[in-house]
Amino acid sequence: LLFLAEGEINQTKKILEEPSMALKKYVPFLALSAYINYKERKIEKAIKLLEEALAIDPSNLWVRNNLLKITKSAAQSIWVDNFERADNTVIGRGWTENEKYGVEISISNKQCLFKGTQSLKGEGITYLERSISRDSFIRFEARFSIPDIERPFPGIYFATQSKDRILFIALRNNQISYGFSTTSDILPTEWSSFQKPPITAQEFKISLEAVGPKGNPAEFHCFIDDVLFGIIPLKIAFGKPQEVSYLVGVYGYAGLNKKWDMTLKTARVFEEKPK
C-alpha cells in the first residue's frame, strides 16, 4: 500500500505477483489487485477479481459497490477531451465554437480558455458544442477552473438536435441552478435552484445524466463533483421523433462590459456501447 500511495504501481504489481504470497483468498489482496487492473484498463480482469472477493465476503460493501460501478462502466464508451494540445484559436476535435459576444475560446497552455469582455448582450453566451447520439447518450460532464475574482457564470447544457428545447445548468451566484430555453445562445428567463450549499471552490465538475428510456429520458440528474445535487423532471418529450442526435455544450457569460475568463480542463461524454 505504501508503494501504491507513492505512485509506484509497478513495484506494487511485483509484490502482488510474487509466488511466495499466500494471499490469493484474502479480500484486501483481491481488491488491491482489482484496483491495479482497473487503472490499467484491464476491466474484465478487475471484474473477475472483485467477483472472487465478493464470493469470499458477500457483506463487503466496498467490493460490492465497486463491482457494480466497474461492471456498469464496462458497458459504456467514454469520449474524453483534456485539451492537451498545442496552442490554437481553433478548438478542434468535433467542437463547434460560438464567440459572438466579445469572449474568445482558445487552446492555451494545454487547456481550453474562455477570455474576453462581455459585449453586445448582457447575457449572450459564449460556448463550445458537440453532437452526440440520441440513442446511446448516458452522461455529459465538464470540469471548470474559475478565478476567485470577477467570477463569470459557467455551465453546461443539453439540447435537442433542432435546439427548440435546451436545458441549461449554471453556477449563478455560487448556486447551481437550471432552466429551459428555446433559443441557442439566449439563457432561460426563469431559473430554479437546487437549494444546496454554495459552490465556492475554484475547480469543480458539473455532470448531467439522462435517466429513463434511451432517446427519451424522463428526467436528468445533476451532479457536482460526482455528488447528486438535484433531479430535473421532464414534463414533455426531449426531441422530435425523427431526430437522431442531441447537442451538449459548455458555456460561460457575465454582465454587459464585464471582463471575465474561465478554463475548461476536461470534458467527457459517456455512451452506451453497441450491443
Image (cartoon, rainbow, N blue to C red):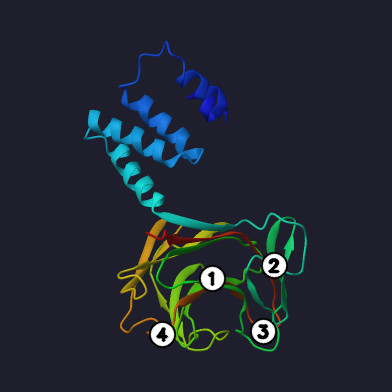
Q: Earlier in the sequence, mark 4 or mark 2?
A: 2
Q: CA distance from mark 2 to mark 1?
A: 18 Å
Q: Earlier in the sequence, mark 2 or mark 3?
A: 2
* Residue type highlighted by circle 2: Ile
| Mark 4 neighbour class, 10 Å CA radius: few under 14, some 14 to 19, many 20 or more | few
| Local SS, label 3 | loop
| Local SS, label 1 | strand
Residues at badges 2 and 3 in contact (C-beta under 8 Å)?
Answer: no
Mark identifier at residue 256 = 3
Asked whether 151 or 113 is in front, the reply is 113
Residues at badges 4 and 2 in contact (C-beta under 8 Å)?
Answer: no
List the single residue furthest toward the left: 58
Mark identifier at residue 242 = 4
Asked whether 183 or 252 is in front, the reply is 183
Decide: is 109 above or below 189.
above
Residue marked by disc 2:
91
* Residue type highlighted by circle 3: Leu
Mark identifier at residue 155 = 1
